[in-house]
């Protein structure tokens, strides 16, 4: 995630802090300084930092449980609204997702119980006043962890409770329908949260926007995964595309740009292997800085990821969700087509209208892109 930096690693997962979290801590410290001086500022910043340490542990509850199912998480990022674990994929089975989802809140429950024991008291009524420095730090942290557990278990997607709801529904009605229901509930919850935030709680509005967008994005990603299920790359790839030869000149690239409606062109070498990508921006930059007969290859972007033509589209979903095209190559490594979000979105649209529509038959020997 951009605008973030790594502060450490645990079991192969990088812990990153987003710049906005530092700004949030600075704002908390400044307000406490104005109200109670430097000591109050230090206490407030330390308490909020401790809360986000618990948030990080919450995320590692998800990460370590997911690892039991072969799912890796290269990084987790701490934001003012919480933590975001970057998982390579979601669990394949609903019961696995249920365990991964519930692991985070259970970590907060365990932390709260440990803090209550350490504090030697279980009076959480006063501890709920988390901004009151007169209440013991351990008691406030215990109350905060219980709040995090309860709030995250609200059955509104994409929070943990929403994922638990989706996992339970998926066992009965399938992943796609379950995601739509859970995402819809999440968006309704976001609307209500935002409405409450309009009455003097601007942070709730910010959280509501995040929840609404995350629920919509998760629903779209699940629909893409459903569309890609058991679908070979040759049935979903774009084949009517113009490619640029690696030995082409700036003039030839400009001519091709004017002759087609493409924004991005695959660049191939003499054997048809994918060398890189050339977009409208790179062609314009070459036109401004180079002679018409100069080679265009130095302006190409690096080659995109590729999959074999007989592989399922699901193997490329991670890159497609990130907005990158994926090259489809034959057994000799020659480019035979491109997978894009647009091509997959069209398949989603067709399957939405006609679930019985068959894509194919797939070509055993797809023709390399010229």
Image: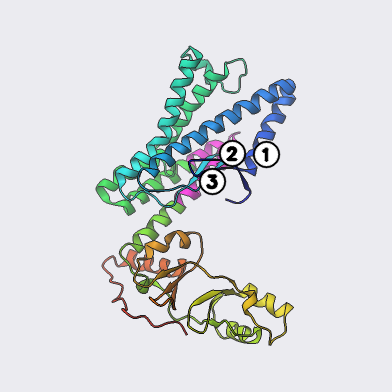
The image shows residue 283, relative to residue 147, as above or below, that is below
Q: In the displayed structure, does residue 51 sit left or right of residue 159?
A: right
Residue at 39 percent across and 60 percent down: it is 224
Density class for disc 2 (Cα within 10 Å; few <14, some 14-19, many ≥20) is: some
Picture coordinates of residue 28, whole percent (x, y): 67, 31
In-front residue for pair 248/97: 248
Residue on which disc 1 sits: 23
Separation (CA) of disc 2 from disc 1: 9 Å
Mark 2 or mark 3, which has the lower sequence index? 2
The image shows residue 343, relative to residue 177, as above or below, that is below
Assess whether residue 200 is covered by the magenta stretch. yes
In-front residue for pair 331/216: 331
Separation (CA) of disc 2 from disc 3: 14 Å
Which contiguous range is marked in magenta? 191-216
Assess whether residue 33 is covered by the magenta stretch. no
Which numbered tag is attached to residue 265?
A: none
CB atoms of marks 2 and 1 within 8 Å: yes
Residue at 43 percent across and 76 percent down: it is 333
Q: Residue 282 is drawn in which quadrant? A: bottom right
Residue on which disc 2 sits: 80
Picture coordinates of residue 254, whole percent (x, y): 63, 83
Separation (CA) of disc 1 from disc 3: 19 Å
Mark 1 or mark 3, which has the lower sequence index? 1
The image shows residue 240, relative to residue 225, as above or below, that is below
Picture coordinates of residue 25, whole percent (x, y): 65, 34
């Amino acid at each position: 995630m951009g605008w973030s930096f790594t502060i450490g690693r645990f079991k192969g997962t990088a812990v990153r802090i987003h710049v906005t979290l530092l700004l949030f801590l600075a704002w908390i410290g400044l307000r406490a300084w104005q109200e109670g001086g430097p000591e109050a500022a230090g206490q407030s910043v330390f308490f909020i930092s401790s809360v986000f340490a618990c948030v990080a542990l919450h995320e590692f509850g998800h990460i370590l449980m997911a690892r039991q199912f072969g799912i890796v998480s290269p990084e987790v990022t701490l934001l003012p609204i919480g933590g975001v674990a970057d998982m390579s994929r979601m669990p394949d089975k609903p019961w696995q997702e249920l365990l991964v989802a519930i692991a985070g809140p259970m970590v907060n429950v365990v932390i709260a119980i440990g803090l209550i024991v350490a504090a030697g008291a279980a009076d959480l009524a006063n501890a709920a006043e988390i901004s009151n420095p007169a209440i013991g730090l351990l008691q406030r942290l215990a109350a905060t962890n219980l709040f995090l557990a309860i709030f995250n278990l609200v059955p509104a997607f994409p929070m943990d409770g929403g994922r638990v709801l989706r996992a339970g529904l998926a066992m009965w009605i399938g992943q796609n329908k379950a995601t739509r229901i859970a995402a819809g509930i999440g968006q309704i919850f976001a609307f209500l949260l935002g409405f409450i935030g309009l009455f003097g709680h601007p942070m709730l509005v910010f959280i509501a926007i995040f929840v609404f967008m995350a629920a919509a994005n998760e629903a779209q990603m699940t629909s893409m995964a459903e569309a890609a299920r058991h679908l070979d790359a040759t049935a979903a790839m774009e084949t009517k595309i113009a490619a640029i030869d690696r030995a082409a000149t700036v003039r030839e690239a400009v001519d091709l740009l004017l002759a087609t409606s493409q924004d991005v062109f695959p660049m191939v070498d003499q054997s048809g292997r994918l060398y890189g990508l050339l977009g409208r921006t790179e062609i314009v930059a070459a036109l401004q800085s180079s002679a018409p007969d100069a080679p265009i290859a130095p302006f190409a972007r690096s080659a995109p990821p590729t999959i074999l033509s007989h592989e399922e589209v699901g193997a490329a979903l991670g890159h497609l969700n990130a907005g990158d095209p994926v090259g489809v190559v034959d057994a000799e490594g020659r480019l035979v087509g491109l997978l894009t979000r647009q091509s997959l979105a069209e398949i989603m649209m067709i399957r939405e209208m006609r679930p019985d529509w068959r894509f194919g038959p797939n070509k055993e020997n797809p023709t390399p892109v010229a």
